[in-house]
Image (spheres, helix red, strand yellow):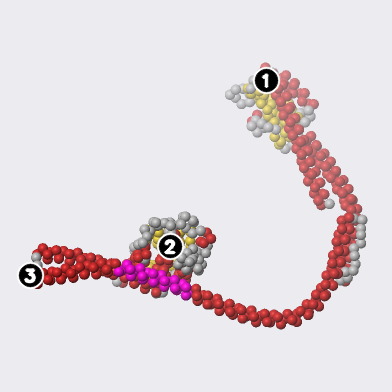
Amino acid sequence: MAITTSALVVTSSISLINQITNYKNELIQQVIIYAEIISNNAISSLEFDDDLIEEENLQILKAATFIEAVHIYRVVEGQNPTYFTSYNRPDQARTPPMWKHIEDFKTPVQTDNKFEFIKPIKLDDKIIGYVYLRVSADILNQLISSSIVTTFAALLIILIICYLLTLRLQKTLANPIINLATLVQRISRQRDYKGRAESTNIKELDILGSAFNDMLDRTQHYLKERDFAEQEQRKLHASLEEKVQLRTVALKAANQELIETLEKLHQFQRQMVQNEKMASLGDMVAGVAHEVNTPIGLGVTASTMMLDRLNHIESEFEAKTLKASTLSKFISEGQENLSIIYRNLNRAAELISSFKQVAVDQSSESNRVFAFAQLLDEILMSMRPKLKKYKHVISVHCPNDLYIETKAGPINQIIMNLVMNSITHGFEFMDEGKIDIYIDLVSENKIKIRYVDNGKGIPEPLRKRIFDPFVTTKRGQGGSGLGMHLVYNLITQALNGSITITSEVDKGVEFTILFPVRIIDPKTLAKGS
């Protein structure tokens, strides 16, 4: 009934609104038609300035009782419209001039209980006057009232008929449903599943009753199987507890073994990381030793030459055959050889000093104060034996007056591993790669290292696992897969920082490293020294 009522109300309302709209549109159309007729008839009167004839013509409008007033105004070029003639329904008071509302009533406008409209009177496309027409809306209101009464009366009659049909249908459907509900309640209270639903004259309810009876049959069968299963379960329960106890003991033993295995795995991983650090240090030692041999060898050669020349001069001096030219040549060669010896020994001393500082930093876990730019120069100088075999360019962008206090050893390991990772993987098929290391002060106590190379980049599947242990593309070719894992551990654990990676294939790689430090004022260091 609610749905039917809602549907009827909606449809009746829509129909009523459409009907009212049509009535209103028809009345507006009549207003426009009358205005058109009056304006056409008034053209000749305005042209010959005969207001009496036009007033007599307007008296015909008495037959149209819904027209309340008609005004005709003359238009003289350069002046406001002037009153020409008018018509007022006998029972209506005289309407004041309305020429000031020409713009307001260009189209029929409903105000209060009337429609008002002003139409221009044209002769040869020239406006010679205006006709004002006011029409009563009483007829429209009567039609609307009649439509509303008719619609609501029809709606009420239809709803009464629907209500009576609903009551009759309810009894036909409700009685079998009540019987079925009573059966369900009895079965629910008594737990007696032997009852069955009776057949009815309604097809749908018969289908429901048949399904309900099938459900009762299955329920009875299920209860029998459940009783049998409970008996079997009680038999199994006794043996199950014993099996659970045995299984619990076995799981405890397996769990203990798993914990011991996991601890051994962690120890093995730590040992592998330590071995990686020592291997890196060993490679650096071998490279520096080879690099130091070159200047020392040159120094030995120059000193040996000096000894030979000195013996030759000595023999000539003892034989009293020493010439001034020979002595002058000896002095010139001696100065040159001594300069060679000095330069090479000084170079060897610088290499050994840089290597010593880097080695001490790698083996030390304590903080120290250092200039960041100088630390990077020492790291790259200690790696020169490996770097000189390539044409790769490494550029460091770091303020020279940036002094900080933190652990230098982890920074050494991080920079070395990143550089070697670029050379080994990023520049694998490149003759001349480029590495840029940017050092920026993010805040008063935080440093950002941005490491960028233009290598072949890292594919997405590998990039997601780049910091996992034993991940490498050089397995079987000397790669252990612990380099980037060591970098991650040093940054997150030793420096309490973070590292992120951005890379695309053939577009290089960028590592962003953030870690806290203590900034040192260079002036304070100068005063302390």
Type of amino acid under label 1: Leu
Figure check: 441 above or below 242: above
Magenta highlight on residue 183: no
Residue at which label 3 appears = 320
**Disc nearer the start of the sequence (1/3):** 1
Figure check: 130 above or below 380: above
**Closer to the camera, 174 or 475?**
475
Q: Position of residue 223 (x, y in %)?
A: 84, 71
1 relative position to 450: left or right = right
Q: Is residue 435 visible?
A: yes
Q: Quadrant of the C terminus?
A: bottom left
**Closer to the camera, 471 or 200?**
471
Magenta segment = 270-293
412 relative position to 42: left or right = left
Residue at which label 2 appears = 424
**Dot 3 alpha-carbon crowd within 10 angstroms: few under 14, some 14 to 19, many 20 or more:** few
**Dot 2 alpha-carbon crowd within 10 angstroms: few under 14, some 14 to 19, many 20 or more:** few
Give the spatial CA distance, label 1 vs label 2. Answer: 105 Å
Tag 2 secondary structure = helix
Q: Position of residue 512 (x, y in %)?
A: 45, 62
**Disc nearer the start of the sequence (3/2):** 3
Magenta highlight on residue 286: yes
Between disc 1 and disc 2, the foreground one is: 2
Residue at which label 1 appears = 46
Type of amino acid under label 2: Thr
272 relative position to 156: left or right = left
